[in-house]
Amino acid sequence: MARPEDSAWAVSVAQVTSRPGQSKTVDVVFPAPSGIGDEVIGVKEGADVSVHGSFDSIVDGLVLTARIEAPVAAECTRCLKPIKRDWGVDVVAFFPYEESAKARSHGKPKNEDVEIVAGEDESEDVYPLSRDGAFADLEALLRDTLVEALPLQPLCREDCRGLCSQCGVDLNEHPDHHHDVTDLRFAALAGLKAQLEAEEHGDK
């Protein structure tokens, strides 16, 4: 049976568990878990993901306040150029003790601290501690946080001009590029005019 401390994303929190008012600094680099994004935009599995912040102990659990940063690889949705940049996300997550988690699952918050941190919305960021409360596993937190933060339409820059719809030229590199387009309706009229003029000259 896998032990919580053997997880690549486990953080020891035993020194602050069940000791309200205590704080533990977190400054760790984890391997990115799988499933963050897709071929268009995402974080490659195993890439370095840094977590900087702290666990703060309250009566019913631990609150993690942190900054998560990861290298994101994407493709600009306008010009299709590859994008590589560090992506940072601020997160606040609650890790309830087992007794508090049971109370919450039955819709019975144990005290006001839980209400202050978690609020009434059941979609809040809540993650379990190990059964003995000694470890917090951040794998699901990293995946959830980064997936939610990825933009739906990544751009290499906000004012990216994209590609020419007719020939595919990168308009960022050739801003003056254009095509002389003739309206097909006017082209037909021009053809009719030329035909009439030809007939007129023929009659002469």
Image (cartoon, helix red, strand yellow):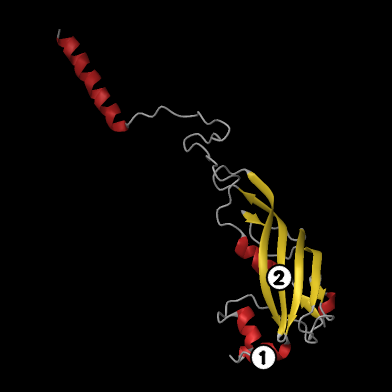
Secondary structure category for the residue under label 1 = helix
Secondary structure category for the residue under label 2 = strand
- Above or below residue 6? Residue 100 is below
Q: Nearer the viewer, mark 1 or mark 2?
A: 2
Residue under label 1, please give it: 102
What mark, if any, has residue 65 been given in the picture?
2
Which of these two is toward me, 33 or 121?
121
Quadrant in the rendering for residue 121:
bottom right
Quadrant in the rendering for residue 42:
bottom right
Q: Where does the image place residue 23, in percent across and percent down from the top left?
A: 79, 76
- Above or below residue 131? Residue 89 is above
Residue positioned 57% across, 77% down in the render: 123
- Classify mark 2: residues with Cα within 10 Å, few (<14), some (14-19) or many (20+): some
Q: Where does the image place residue 46, in percent across and percent down from the top left?
A: 77, 60
Q: Where does the image place residue 150, in percent across and percent down from the top left?
A: 61, 59
Residue positioned 64% across, 90% down in the render: 111
Residue positioned 47% across, 35% down in the render: 166
Q: Amino acid at mark 1?
A: Lys
Which badge, 1 or 2, is on the more N-terminal residue?
2
Relative horizontal placement of residue 9, taking residue 198 as reference (left or right): right
The quarter of the image holding the N terminus is bottom right
The quarter of the image holding the C terminus is top left
